[in-house]
Image (cartoon, grey):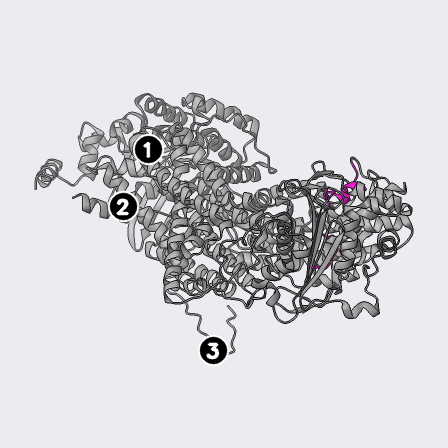
Amino acid sequence: MSKLQFRVLYREFLFRLVDLEILTSQGDITKLLGQFAALLLFVGMYIMLPVVVGLGSSDAVPEIGLLGAWTAEHFVISTTMLVVGLFAVMSWDSMFPDRRDVLVLSPLPVRAPALFAAKAAAVATGLGVTVLALNAFAGIGGAFVFASAPVAPPVQFDAAMAPVGIDHMQAVLDHDLIPAFAPNGALARGNGAGAVVGIVQHGERRIFAYGAASPDSIYEIGSLSKTFTALILARMAAEGRVQLDQPVRELLPSGVVAKPNGPEITLLDLATHHSGLPRMPGNLDFETMDLALARYRTSDLYTFLAKHGVRKPANAHFRDSDLGFGLLGEALAHRAGTSYEKLLAAEITVPLGMNDTTTKVPAEQRVRLIQAYNQRNKPVPAWDMGALAGAGTVRSTAADMLTYLEAQLHPEKLPPNLSTLRTAIVSSHELRADAGSGQRIALAWLFVPLLGVYIHDGSISGYTSYAFFQPQADFGGVVLFNAATPAGFAGLLAQHIGARLTGLPAFSLVNQVIPGKGGALATLRSFAAYWITMAASGIFLFGLVLSIQGLAQLLPRQLFLRVSSFLQLAFFVALLTVYFLQPGFSDLETLAENQTTLGWLPSYWFFGLFQQLNGPLNPNLAFLTHRAWIGLGAAICGAAGAYLLCYLRTLRKIAEQPDILPDRRLFRWMPRFGGPFPTAIGQFSVRSLLRSRQHRVLLSFYLGVAFGLALFIAKAPALGEERPDDLWYQVNASLLVASVLMICSSAIGVRVVFAMPIEPRANWMLRVMPLPPLPQCLPAIRRSLYALALAPVWVILAALLFWIWPWRIAAEHLTVLALIGIIVAELWLAGFQKIPFTCSYQPGKSKFHMAGLIFVILMFLAIRGSALERGALDSPRLFAITAGALALIAILLRYRTNMQAREEGAVLHFDDPPEPAVLSLGLYRDGVLPLS
Amino acid sequence: MLQLLNVSKRFNGIPAVDGISFCARPGEVTGYLGPNGSGKSTTMKMITLLIEKTSGEILFDGERTDRDPIAFKRRMGYVPEEPHLYPHLTGLEYLVMVGQLRGLPEKRTAERIDGLLRSFSLHSDRHLPLSSYSKGMRQKVLLAAALLHNPDLILLDEPFSSLDVASALVIRSLLQELAARGKVVLFSSHELDTVERIAAHVIILHRAHVVADDSIEHLRTLMALPTLEDIFSQLAVEQDTAAVSREIADLIRL
């Protein structure tokens, strides 16, 4: 008896797990399951599998192969969690016995445990099918790919030794660097890798060259140049030519940038990375960074600055900015009436006798400029920084850098005629602000309080460098390297040297990443790890939803019903936001630096779990694994507790109380939409959308995905770690695309929900009303669509854009947005001869499963269109043409919609026409187009 | 006056109503009776233009109702058999929407809605969503919506089915009052007692045909039967009710 009951209930609950109306055509159960599985298989095969095979395949360079594999692993985990989360949102109301279950089943002799067991089994089946279908292809391909992917074993330390004096350093380094020459070691990359190490201790200096380098090889030192720019500032300040707290605007030609209201960016802000400026200016072509930088002129910099302004954000925190130091270099050069190159020579390199240090390598020295190699061991040219020279255009040798470091260690030894330089060096060591990660910042130099050491690194083109000095222990060093490695070999070697000089444990210079071995056993292990991880991540997310609902059930039943609806939306938005905003892997160092952020992201927890199961586990990921197990345990307990709570407490209350909370709202104002008829339709639409959960969820899907994509496109400012092209405070294509995407998605989403009836059986009321003919109804329908779809998004975007952009640009873009919104709305209004939310329809007409395709097309059009618009915004004539063309299209589309409404036989529909009994196969003769 | 002339409705060739003709006159309440499936609701839906008739003519004050449907709908109020309403709207919002859709002047309509809600004892619940209304409350909302524009023709499809005794008494008097003020009132019902009390004129439908169309008084005299129930049983009930009862009781013992 109970087995039969279980089977019947299980089948019933399983088929009611997701909203039939949304997903399937004609509400057919078989079709529903088929479509659902097909959708997941499609996602799995066309999105996840290529990522797994493409990114996860082993690369010639292990570090890149590792990052590719990690990116692919994290992608499949986070995508699985996203899909499971979306499934949980869709089945939100089906996870626990609901009012219908209780009212129907209570009078029957069905035992509550059977009811709960069937419900839990249905939920588990839904979850299992989701995970299985989604990963059917990627799960098999992934096992092979991930088994042979490179791995990052735990970092090792070399045998400890007493502090090494400079005389013995070469022998120690020769020994310690042996692993770096091993296959795939940093110095064994291709044939050209070469490092030069310079060390100074108590006035004695040594230079060692390894690999392809010579002791006098010239390197680009990248961001180490910033310490030179900062020292120029300090010297000019010491000579009274500028003040540290002077606004940078005052150093620029008059008229370049307006004086802002409120605090201004000062020279000190620029030298301590506290200006709030982005990493790079937005008017730089990032596709061809090397060439674009070389061509970046002072006029370009000023153009950017004029648009961006020099207002200092209220809470400007430490933010590494090449733009800031480039601007500082330009400003100082302009004040000095010379170029940055000449200023550098006059203020630092000539006085200190650094003959090989310059921004442009003379022809006779060019033979010593060592070739740089990128992360794939391909030779790459040296970069010029154009107007941003102050941020990283200096070339130097180890010998010159040691001279520079000696001056840092002993400014008092400088000759009397360089007294201002001496003062400047002392001033440049003064700690000015926090720089995150327990570090402080002086003028460009970072200070590590724990070690008492000043540090700075550099990276440009394929060159990497690292310099440090410890004034108390009187030593300093520099490592110059001509290959870009994700693991940061220059920094690793420099820290190793520092540790040897002080006797601290030193990182082993053995390669941090080793190629994967593959093999049958490893593949089997990878297969098991993959599926366990996917199942665990799915269980975690589903358990989380159940736990949230369980906690909410502690509220009074009526309140729970209302809160549950908002929780569903909040969870949905959070899911999409986290998916699109979570940081990716750029290199191994970033992983360690991002620990706090990653610790809050469950997809990374399960990424850590996969690493543990697939082995070996990188220690940087151990904390993630720990959290995955805790999270999984908590979610399972939470879900079990939620069911128990429902069983013990809630079940009876469901039957006792109505599902609808009595209305206690005080705010009942509704906007008018014109005359009585448009107002009736408009207010009905607003109320329907606000009060129907099903419609809200569907609209949220469109808006949520668009919002997620929009944030993804323009995400940097939200996270505080910008990509170079993500700058809110300037007119940029990303924000244009994001805003266009939002307004289009809103129009499409609202139009889709308009087509779904709220209570078709109540439509009789409209049919017996003396409604005006269709042409007179159309304005009311149109107003509802505009008011619900376009107006709210447009107003929010207007507030944002007027806040961050100059008013003219914002107004122009808002005009374009309004016209695009009208065009999309009119496109979707074609043939929509219905009162919103009233026309009964064949279920599944929302074509929910086609939404992905719609977004791809929308993205493509928005990106192309925004590139055009970006150009038009700078030219009033071009803008007038663009806006005129859009207005013309909008007018034509409106005209077409109006004409359709006037066609003979056009009436308001309250029922979708049923599927024809005889379906046309659409077979035509070759070359003949169907004309009707 | 509402006139149906030889009106038929066929669904897939099967007649739901077959050539019926009758009149409902102003000043009197017309009862429309018939067993389940006899075609009462179909007739009501044809009159309201919710469904199209297959043949025949429906006239109101001598005009074909389908010639100018909008003008006809302005003069008609309708209470359907099932109280289907938009569940997410409150009672007040629903009535306001009906007023707006009918293009009624807002201020006067607001006063009228307020009065109707008070009269139907719904005023304190006017801000509750209709989904939380009982069936009787929903029926009262429907009645209020049907009367909001002071219609000349009032069609009620089983209006008493879910009302409590007090409300039923009010509605009963109301229909008589409206008829007395010159309205055409046509209502269908299974409650023969009620019909007998308020209707001067009844139409009895059986198997898609009109089998009686006369005043109750005249029918009693004509058929020599004391009550409307007896008349109805003779004209429209074919089953031996006692035999059917015995059959059911025997069946569930199996």
Q: Relative to A658, say whether A303 is above or below.
A: below
Residue A710 drawn at (x, y percent)? 60, 50
Regarding residue A712, the answer to whether it shows in the image is yes
Give A198 or A21, whichever is nearer the viewer.
A198
Q: Amino acid at mark 2?
A: Ala
Residue A470 drawn at (x, y percent)? 70, 45
User: Along the horizontal axis of the image, is A849 left or right of B218?
Assistant: right
Dot 1 alpha-carbon crowd within 10 angstroms: few under 14, some 14 to 19, many 20 or more: some
* Magenta residues (range): A263-286
Give A560 or A266, whichever is nearer the viewer.
A266
| Circle 3 residue | A925
- Foreground tag (3 vs 1): 1
Q: Chain of mark 2?
A: B
Write down the quadrant of residue A133 in the picture: bottom left
Secondary structure state at the residue bearing disc 2: loop
Q: Which mark is residue B208?
A: 2
Give A426 or A831, whichever is nearer the viewer.
A426
**C-alpha span from label 1 to label 2:** 56 Å
User: Along the horizontal axis of the image, is A823 left or right of A88?
Assistant: right
Assess whether residue A266 is covered by the magenta stretch. Answer: yes
| Circle 1 residue | A645
Q: Relative to A650, say whether A900 is above or below.
A: below
